[in-house]
Amino acid sequence: MTAGARPGQMLDRTFRTAPHPAKVTVHSVMTDIYAEGGNYRIELDAGVASCRVWARPDLDSAAGARFAREKVGHFEALSLGAARGMIFDLSAAPPVAGPSTQESLGQMLATWERAKRPIAVVGGSNQIQLLQLRRLVASHAPGYGSLFTELPAARAWILGFGTVSRA
């Protein structure tokens, strides 16, 4: 994470994958930071938006709900603008969303459905979270949303919209 990053700033991020300790591959990714908030970051990469949300033990549910409401406007602008799809990574988010956050999540999903652009939602391993997300996707983005449990599958689905099996 780059300290002091601003919307529109390019981030050169290098990361490593190591399926076997002796074999390490280094990848370099150029990503445009669109927005950052107290527990989320939205990036653009080759026309695909990615929003990653993470849990913060120092935040109460009211603060988390405020951050969720912030994202609604960002999602709407992206769905009507340059982004051809969204990867919404909630795998590190709090496992259970309260009513206000669920309402905001539904609004975020609905913006992509109305724009007729795909949104891939990535849930974590918590079964309650997956049940909530499955219901939200089915209710608010039945035609253009899909739920995944692994980020690579979500990314493949967005890049080839509809060619990968859904979770």
Image: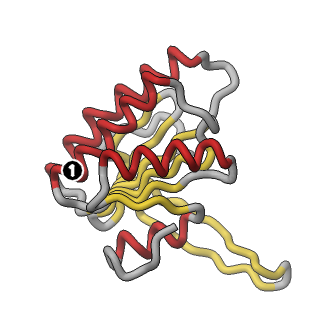
Considering only vertical position in the picture, is 23 above or below 75?
below
Residue depicted at 36% across the width and 31% down the height = 104
Residue depicted at 34% across the width and 58% down the height = 145
Q: Is residue 108 shown left or right of residue 27?
A: left
Q: Is residue 122 shown left or right of residue 20?
A: left
Please state the horizontal and vertical placement of residue 7, each as a whole percent of the image. Answer: 32, 40
Residue depicted at 60% across the width and 50% down the height = 91
| Classed neighbour count for the residue bearing mark 1: other residues with Cα under 10 Å, few (<14), some (14–19), many (≥20) | many
Please state the horizontal and vertical placement of residue 107, each as a whole percent of the image. Answer: 29, 36
Name the outermost residue toward the bottom.
23
* In-front residue for pair 84/99: 99
Name the outermost residue toward the right.
21
User: Of helix, strand and loop, which one carries label 1?
Assistant: helix
Q: Is residue 59 shown left or right of residue 134?
A: right
Please state the horizontal and vertical placement of residue 99, each as a whole percent of the image. Answer: 46, 24
User: In this figure, what is the number of numbered marks?
Assistant: 1
Residue depicted at 41% across the width and 61% down the height = 146
Quarter location, residue 156? bottom left
Considering only vertical position in the picture, is 162 above or below 58?
below
Q: Amino acid at mark 1?
A: Ser
Please state the horizontal and vertical placement of residue 63, each as a whole percent of the image. Answer: 51, 17
Considering only vertical position in the picture, is 152 above or below 59?
below
Residue annotated with mark 1: 79
Quarter location, residue 17? bottom right
Q: What colouring style does the render use?
A: secondary structure
* In-front residue for pair 34/67: 67
